[in-house]
Amino acid sequence: MPEDLPTPEKSIQEIEKEHSIMRKMGLPKPTGEYAVGTFTYTVKDDRKEIMRQGGMRSVAARVYYPVLRESVKGLTKAVALSDNMLKGLKDTFNVVPDFRKNPESNLTECYLNANRIPGKKFPLIMFNHAYNSYREGNSCLCTELASNGYVVISVDHSHEAVCSEFDDGTVLFFDKTIKKKMYKPMIGGIITMLKLVRLAIFESCSQMMVRSLAIQLFSGKRIEV
């Protein structure tokens, strides 16, 4: 569950106050030796999309990678939350940051399509966002890792994310019916499990009764079970 989701201990007003502080402070700067480049890409699979009829499965991802600091001069920084992402957050949680007064606070420390370091290889980290989150939801962590010499691929989970943006311009928002789709196949298994538990309890009681009768038969003593 995302930390920004309102709870009895954290009111919407408190969350909005935290967002206000974030807008004023901006995102933290990475501490590693490298600057960070980023780009997005979409992988199209030949499997049918079971969550949405009539389409093929597509997976969107964002890549964070180390680059030389001198190579990012004059490049554009990536936006932290796109308009579509802001809409997805508002539709899902009814809370959304407002960057109109300070647009620069919505910029990350990643540079779009920065040149890679020729001949340099880095270890790869695959990052999966949480349910009801989005691929840029932990961009600060991914940026920090990239600045310290890692390539990070953050994979998007369509229909489970608040918003999924694909390179062809397609946008998918959180599917509020997904819980029913997830739990419906489990109902039969739960019913079967309850039947097995009931059967196990019945067999256990039957064995105790048989043992009690056997003891009474051979010892002549009456034992309460």
Image (spheres, rainbow, N blue to C red):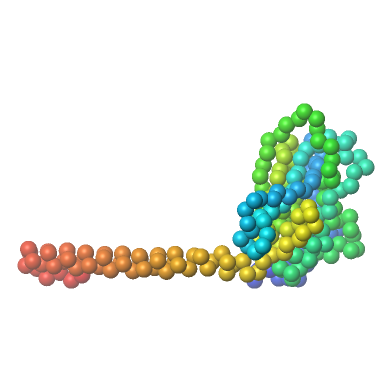
Quarter of the figure with residue 4: bottom right
**Whole-percent x, y for residue 48 in the image:** 63, 57
User: For residue 55, which quarter of the picture?
Assistant: bottom right
Position above or below: 162 against 135: below
Q: Is residue 156 above or below residue 183?
A: above
Q: Is residue 95 left or right of residue 208?
A: right
Q: Is residue 127 left or right of residue 144?
A: left
Query: Where 187 falls versus 126 (above or below)?
Result: below
What percent of the width, then of the height, locates residue 70?
88, 35
Observer-nearest of 87 and 30: 87
Give the residue displayed 7% in from the left and 63% down from the top.
218
- For the point 65% across and 64% down, the residue is 53
* Camera sees residue 192: yes
Q: Residue at x 77, y 28 (%)?
A: 119
User: Residue placed at 84% from the left, 37% from the top?
Assistant: 115
Percent position of residue 45, x then y: 66, 50
